Image (spheres, grey):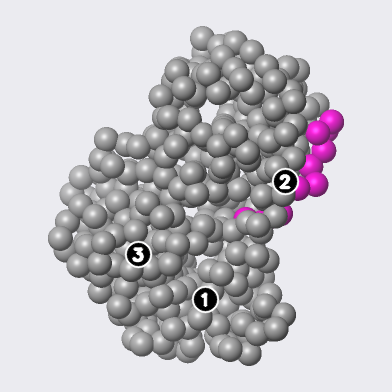
């Protein structure tokens, strides 16, 4: 079965975390026996993990901070560039999609709309995340476009809070690749960890809330910030008052990432709601932390509450410094709590591997014989 995957974010080279969950599902589809072809925003490689990738130039819109930030700060030029990208993406999908039997799109705009127009009534799994829904909710035209897509495709929201009235769809959090197997000893040495250490892992953009974390960091904890993004410079400056207690290590991949997850004492996901209403879907880093057996402390924002049970598999707090600080102090001072949460996290994390999530996300996308083989029926 020939399946096209249309997305604005996809790894630009092996190990790139950009669009990692998109790539994870594409690999899962390939493992079922599907012939998978990717159409993605560029720049980037033409073959990633053995899958062919056709790139449409998206420089200035994607990867660094994301399209919403680029559009808000880019003025008329950015919106014009976005319109040109939309047209180029639709044309590329129309050409490539002629031989597809089914398609998967990630982000309703521009990918979902372009795909629906190109492939007609063929099977189409359209996945909505967070930035696209925030954009569409702002206008009657956007909401109308989403409702139109819901009638033509199998619409999936990555978190329940994203569901738009009149545009029904399933809710399925994205899956994760295996992040276990790291060495705590090697990670502690590699990243020079000496005390109890909290880990932030993600893009350095406003919605991720690293500034909130810096305001909440208690004296009992050191902090490793692993990631890159447009706010890196401002956040480093803000963290100078902590001295060596807060270190920025840049983007981590592969063995480095697994070792860091093994070496940290807890994971912090301090997501926030922006003034324009934008927030996260279900952060995959929470799922990675669970899978790696890390106690997770996250704010009650986006889809965090759908994957964390407060006091059982992690701690959930309000997105403000005092609540976050109290939770971090509690974790720092209670090794038994960390151990209990870590044990529950490992068990919960198994539910979010692609082997489990893939069939749920695929739904009726695949031919009956493929679905039967995948589910072991």
Q: Secondary structure at mark 2?
A: helix
Range of residues picked out in magenta? 176-186
Residue receiving disc 1: 363
Q: Is disc 1 in contact with disc 3, using a CB cutoff of under 8 Å?
A: no
Q: Secondary structure at mark 1?
A: loop
Does residue 262 appear in the picture of this structure? yes
| The image quarter in which residue 209 lies | top left
Of pointers 2 and 1, the one earlier in the residue sequence? 2
Of pointers 1 and 3, the one earlier in the residue sequence? 3
| The image quarter in which residue 20 lies | bottom right
| The image quarter in which residue 121 lies | bottom left
Does residue 61 appear in the picture of this structure? no
Residue receiving disc 2: 346
Q: Quadrant of the C terminus?
A: bottom right
Residue placed at 49% from the left, 88% from the top? 101
Is residue 178 rendered magenta in the image? yes
Give residue 363's position: percent from left, percent from top.
Answer: 52, 76
Quick one: 128 or 245, which is closer to the camera?
A: 128
Q: Report, in whole angstroms, how far the alpha carbon at label 1 lies from the one at label 3.
A: 18 Å
Q: Determine crowd level at label 2: few under 14, some 14-19, many 20+ residues with C-alpha closer than 10 A.
A: many
**Disc nearest the viewer among 2 and 3:** 2
In the drawing, what numbered circle is on residue 100?
A: none
Q: Determine crowd level at label 3: few under 14, some 14-19, many 20+ residues with C-alpha closer than 10 A.
A: many
**Disc nearest the viewer among 1 and 3:** 1
Q: Report, in whole angstroms, how far the alpha carbon at label 2 lies from the one at label 1.
A: 26 Å
Residue receiving disc 3: 108
């Amino acid at each position: 079965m020939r399946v096209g995957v249309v997305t604005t974010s996809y790894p630009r080279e092996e190990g790139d975390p950009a669009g990692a969950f998109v790539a994870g599902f594409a690999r899962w589809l390939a493992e079922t026996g599907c012939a998978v072809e990717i159409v993605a925003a560029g720049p980037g490689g033409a073959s990633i993990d053995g899958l062919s990738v056709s790139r449409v130039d998206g420089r200035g819109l994607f990867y660094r901070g994301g399209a919403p930030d680029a559009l808000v700060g880019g003025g008329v030029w950015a919106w014009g560039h976005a319109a040109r990208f939309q047209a180029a993406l639709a044309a590329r999908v129309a050409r490539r999609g002629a031989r597809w039997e089914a398609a998967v799109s990630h982000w309703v705009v521009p990918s979902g709309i372009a795909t629906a127009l190109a492939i007609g009534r063929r099977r189409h799994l359209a996945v909505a995340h967070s930035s696209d829904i925030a954009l569409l909710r702002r206008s009657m035209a956007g909401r109308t476009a989403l409702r139109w897509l819901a009638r033509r495709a199998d619409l999936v929201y990555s978190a329940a809070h994203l569901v738009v009235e009149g545009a029904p769809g399933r809710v399925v959090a994205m899956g994760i690749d295996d992040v276990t197997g790291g060495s705590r000893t090697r990670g502690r040495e590699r990243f020079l960890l000496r005390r109890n250490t909290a880990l932030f892992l993600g893009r350095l953009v406003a919605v991720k809330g690293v500034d909130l974390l810096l305001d909440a960091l208690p004296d009992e904890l050191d902090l490793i910030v692993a990631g890159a993004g447009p706010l890196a410079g401002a956040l480093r400056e803000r963290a100078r008052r902590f001295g060596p207690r807060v270190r920025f290590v840049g983007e981590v991949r592969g063995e480095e990432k697994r070792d860091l997850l093994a070496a940290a004492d807890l994971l912090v996901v301090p997501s926030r709601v922006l003034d324009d209403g934008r927030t996260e879907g279900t952060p995959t880093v929470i799922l990675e932390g669970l899978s790696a057996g890390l106690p997770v402390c996250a704010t009650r924002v986006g889809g965090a509450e759908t994957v964390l049970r407060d006091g059982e598999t992690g701690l959930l707090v309000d997105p403000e410094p005092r609540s976050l600080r109290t939770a971090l102090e509690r974790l720092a001072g209670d090794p038994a709590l960390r151990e209990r949460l870590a044990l529950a996290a490992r068990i919960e994390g198994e539910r979010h591997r692609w082997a489990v999530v893939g069939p749920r996300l695929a739904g009726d996308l695949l031919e009956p014989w493929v679905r039967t083989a995948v589910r072991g029926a």
